[in-house]
Every structure is written in C-alpha cells, then in structure tokens.
Image (tube, rainbow, N blue to C red):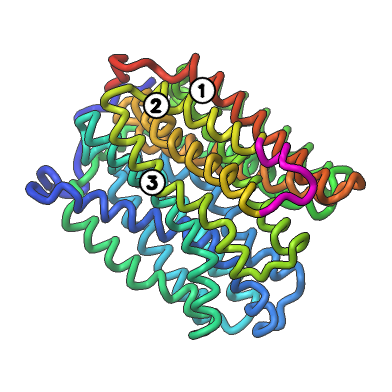
Amino acid sequence: MVRADRPRADRPGGPAAPGRPLAPLLAVCAGYFMVILDVTVINVAVPVVGRDLSASLTGIQWITDGYTLVFAGLLLTGGALGDRLGNRRIFCTGVVVFTLASAGCGLAPTSEALIAARLVEGLGAALIVPGSLALLQQAYPAPAERSRAFGLWGSMAGIAASAGPLLGGLLVTTVGWRSVFFINLPVGCACLLLTLRHVSASARRTDRPVDWPAQCALIATVALLTTVLNEAGRRGWTDPLILTGAGLCLLSAAAFVLREHLARTPVLPLRSRPMSGAAAIGLLFNFAFYGMIFTASLYFQHHRGLTALRTGLALFPAVAMTMFASVLSGRLARRTGHRPLVVTGMLLGAAGLAGWAAAGSRPDYLLLVGPMMAAGFGTSFALTGATATVMSAAPDAYSGTASALFNTTRQIGSAAGVALGGSLLAAAAGFTTGLRTSMAIGAAAYLTAAALAFFCVPPKGHRPATG
C-alpha cells in the first residue's frame, strides 16, 4: 500500500461548521437522497414519457437502465478519484454534473436526448455516492457520532425509495413528467451550497496514480454484470446475448484480477476480512430486500390488480421501517457494537421473507404486512453496522475507495435480486410458486449474511484501522 504524504486540502478550511454539527450531515444526505430518489421516481413516469416522446420499448428500457448501468459501473472510479483529488471536490463535481443532467432530462425533446442525459446523471451519481460516506467519516470522527451519521445516511435510502413512487405519481399526475427531473434542481443547489459552506476541504493525494487499465477492466466487469442481470429476466438465461455478455464479464474480471496482482498501486489496496465480509453482507441484504420489493410490486399489481399508487401504499410499511431502523441502530451501536445489530437485523429479515414464503398461495394482505416490515426493518438495522465496518476497516486515505466498494456490491446485489425474482416469476412453475421461491431464496440470503456478520463484523471495542 502506498503511504500518503501529508495531504493537501482543496482549499484551506477548519472543522466543518463548529456549533452546527448537523450541517455536514444535511449536505451529504441531500446528495445521496437525490441519487436514490432518481432510481425509484422514474418507474412511475416511464410509461407517460414513452407516450409523450414516442419512445420504443428499447428506448423506455434504456431510460430506466442506462442510469443504473453507468452509476454501478463507475462507482469505484469515483471513489478512486475522490481519494486522489479530494472527496469534497469530487462530491461537489458530482452534484453539479447530476443537477445539470437533471435539467437536461427535463428539457429533453426526444427519447435519445433523454437517454443521453440519464447516462450523464449516472456519472454524477457515481461521483456523489463514494464521497458521501467519506465526507461523513471525515466530518464525524467520534465513533458514536459517526454511527448516528451513518444511520441517518442509510435512512435516506429508505426515505427516497418510499417517496419515489408516491412523489413520481403525484408529480406526473399534477404537473407532468418533466417535473420528476426538475425537482432535483433546488435539491442539488442546496446540497452544493451546504457542502461548500459547512463541509471541510478533503485531503488530496496526488502522489497516488489512478490505475486506468484496472479501472477500465473493473468498469467493464460491473457494467456487463449489471446488464446481464437486468436483461436475463426479460430475455432468459440461455439467450445468446446473455451468454455472450456473461463470457465477456468473466474475461474482464480475470483481466482486473491479473492487473491487481501486477500493479504497484492496486485499485483495492487493502484486503481484510471485515471489509470483504461487510461488502458481501451488503450484497446479500440488497439482493434479498430489493428482490422482495420487486416481486411484491409485481404481485400486488398483476396478481391482485392494484394500481401503481395503491401498490406503492401497500409497500409503504416495508420501506417506512427502513427510516426508523437506521436511526435506531446508529443510536444503539455505541452500547452494543455493530455485530449484534447486524446479526439481529439479518435474522429479522430472514424471518420476514420466510413468513411470506410460508403464507400460502393467496394470503390476506394483513398477513404480509408483518413479513414486509420485518424485512425492511432488518435490512436497515444491519445497514449502519455494515457501513461502519467497511469504512472503519479502511485507512482514511482510502475512504472513498472503501465506500465505492461497498456501494458497488450493493448495486450488484440489487440487480441480481431483481433479475432472479423476474426469472422465477416468469418460470413455467407459475407466478405464485415463483414468488414463494423467490422469498425463500431471499430468506436464505439473509441467513447467510447473518453468519457472515458473526465472523466478519468486529465485536465492540475492536480498534479500527487508521490511516
């Protein structure tokens, strides 16, 4: 590992906003909220967008998937750039790119222009997310404050995920689909102003080169994997394009591993059991939770005939629990440490999905509320601990890379959960059987994450890595 020289700041600055400790948290969470909201809010607007812009089915798919593809593929590059050039600088750059791209989306005259703007939005998101955790780690060095900050950061995902469909439906119905993108403009401007004013300048380590061959191999691996997982549910796992994409993904992954062994400054310089274990936990609980949300959404709309708005309301108890659980786990962590919270959360999630799988072919909605709430609560209850484990395992000099690694594995988990759920629902065994099988597999993923947490998440009192 390259030892960093004394860091240079983006510009001189002292501690962030003395006397106003919430200002850095509000700044960072505003950016993260914007990114996650854009993942979910578009789902309700896409049918209207397609009609208004005369988009083909492929065009509609790219309006949704193009953003996620670029976002997932460039996360680790964004983290590496943040560690080299300063996390605040890269975070602010991402906010500017994302905000301008949102304006471009809202003004897009054609579907092709909208797709291009969505790809640029994904680039902005990939610069925002790694820096968000790194800036929180910088702004809140005390373990108790950091745990609470990570908990609130995690709750932003739940708030954005739950608000997306409801807000999107309201805006599309009352103002029009372009307002779905224009709403990012005031949020982005507020985020940028808060960050520049209240978040301290970050260290710059220009002595650390970016290994572009490895980054390109990694981008290709994540992009191909995300594409294969997203498209497999529609095309089938034996489709020639899916098999070709999977083969290319393996080749690019092998090229990345080879380059990592040969490079003087590898992309992932620190390899530890806590870091790799917590990243795997993030992949597993995103796989289970977002697979559940996807299959449950299709179940309520296609099997029970609910409208999109009523489906959003039916799912709201699950995503609402994520808001509460993240904050609670952040407060409890200083007493118990993170390991028992992560284990407990994963066991709750497993119990919830197992309860749905055992509920029968057409259970009453009231029998499904408890399992959905358990999965939502358990996932966010574990998120804080998993986040803190990854970030604590990395020296401060590599906080952006550690954040990017964690969020990349989570994105892959989400894509895999959605792809597997879609494939099982479309299988010959039938919709109901596929749904219950998907829930059972999700429960097994939660149990695997609980076992990993027991061995990989350090107990209370463990000294984190420093850098």
Which residue in the protein does label 1 denote? 277
Secondary structure predominantly adopted by residues drawn in magenta = loop
**137 is higher (above) or lower (below) than 51:** above
Which residue in the protein does label 3 denote? 324
CB contact under 8 Å: marks 3 and 2: no
Residue type at numbered disc 3: Phe
| 34 relative position to 347: left or right | left
Q: CA distance from mark 1 to mark 2?
A: 9 Å
Which residue in the protein does label 2 denote? 389
* The C terminus, quarter of image: top left
N-terminal label among 1 and 2: 1
Q: CA distance from mark 3 to mark 1?
A: 25 Å
Q: CA distance from mark 3 to mark 2?
A: 20 Å
**16 is higher (above) or lower (below) than 313:** above
Identify the residue shown where x is 23% and y is 27%: 5
**454 is higher (above) or lower (below) than 107:** above
- From the top left corner, tell me how far across and down residue 142 is, in percent: 20, 30
